[in-house]
Image (cartoon, rainbow, N blue to C red):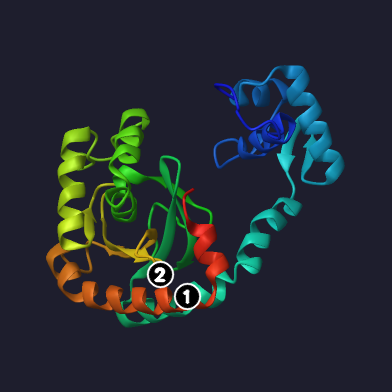
Amino acid sequence: MKGERKDPEFLSTLERGLRVLKAFDEDHSEMTLSQVAAKTGLSPAVARRCLNTLVELGYMGKHDRKFLLRPKVLTIGSAFLSSMHVEHVCLPGLQHLRDQTGDSASLSVLSGEDILYIAHVSTDRRFRLQTNVGTRYPFHATSMGKVLVAFMDEDARTELLAKASLQRFTERTLIEPQPLEERFKLIKERGYDSALDELDYGIVSIAIPIFDRNRNVIAAINCSTSTTRISQDELVRTRLPLLREAAGEIEAALRQWPSLSASLHTK
């Protein structure tokens, strides 16, 4: 980890183990010890101890000198979903939204420089970019991400923009801080964001914030579909009232489950 930790009870060994787990992804499904060490920035000796511990615990396996995740890893994420009653709170509103529109519907939170999908209801339409619970996308290329950042504290937003890797995905992706700040101002004025061909071509979406009982933004929901189905203007006109209705349902449910509301806070 970079910098010094002020909390004397911070366990660097636990952090390193989690760093090793998170190193495996779609592009790195199997890795050798040296590859894990290089990707995590850990020394080979430390990476080896982390890997061997995770193998012993059943979270990782080894095949032909390469390490890979095992199904037991799913228990970590599923513990959040079940203990926080995510399905009970979030899915009814999103499913109703999907059924009304034929769009996919999702709820996400901000996680570092990305949005992290907490709940997702898909359609039978196929996109090049597939989304599931646990999927991450850079905030600046998504409607939900820009909504979440727009309602951040100004100092926190400035800090995020200064360190974020603002990658260009299409010619419409905003990658400069000033245009993004202008977009954030517009989002706060109108209460929503709509993205067209910003993360990938052929995708149009609209997102609005989810508020807690104290009117703090803790999540965002969206509708997303293909540009062959609907124009951006028509999407905004027809989906915005339905999104607000779904948001109201989710916010009411969150008041019944304050532990989930507390968990969704970024800090």
- The alpha-carbon separation of the residues under discs 1 and 2 comes to 7 Å
Task: Tell which of 110 and 267 is nearer to you.
Answer: 267
Residue occupying the point 22% across, 77% down: 241
Q: Amino acid at mark 2?
A: Arg
Amino acid carrying label 1: it is Arg
**Residue 203 % position (x, y):** 28, 56
Residue 174 figure quarter:
top left
One can see residue 18 in this view: yes
Residue 202 versus residue 212 in the image, above or below: above
Q: Where on the picture, by quarter, is residue 157?
A: top left
The residue that disc 1 covers is 255
Q: Position of residue 137 (x, y in %)?
A: 41, 46
> Do the CB atoms of the residues marked 1 and 2 lie less than 8 Å apart?
yes
Q: Position of residue 147 (x, y in %)?
A: 29, 54
| Image-based side of 33 in relation to 180, left or right | right
Sequence-wise, which precedes: disc 1 or disc 2? 2
Q: Nearer the viewer, residue 157 or 132?
A: 157
Instruction: Kindly give the residue lying farthest to the right in the view shown.
Output: 56
What residue do we see at 81% from left, 27% from top? 49
Q: Position of residue 85 (x, y in %)?
A: 59, 72
| Number of residue marks | 2
Q: Is residue 49 above or below residue 102?
A: above
Position of 222 relative to 156 (above/below): below
Q: Is residue 194 left or right of residue 120?
A: left
The residue indicated by pointer 2 is 213
Where's the N terminus, which quadrant? top right
Q: Secondary structure at mark 2?
A: loop
Report crowding for label 1: few under 14, some 14 to 19, many 20 or more residues within 10 A (C-alpha): some
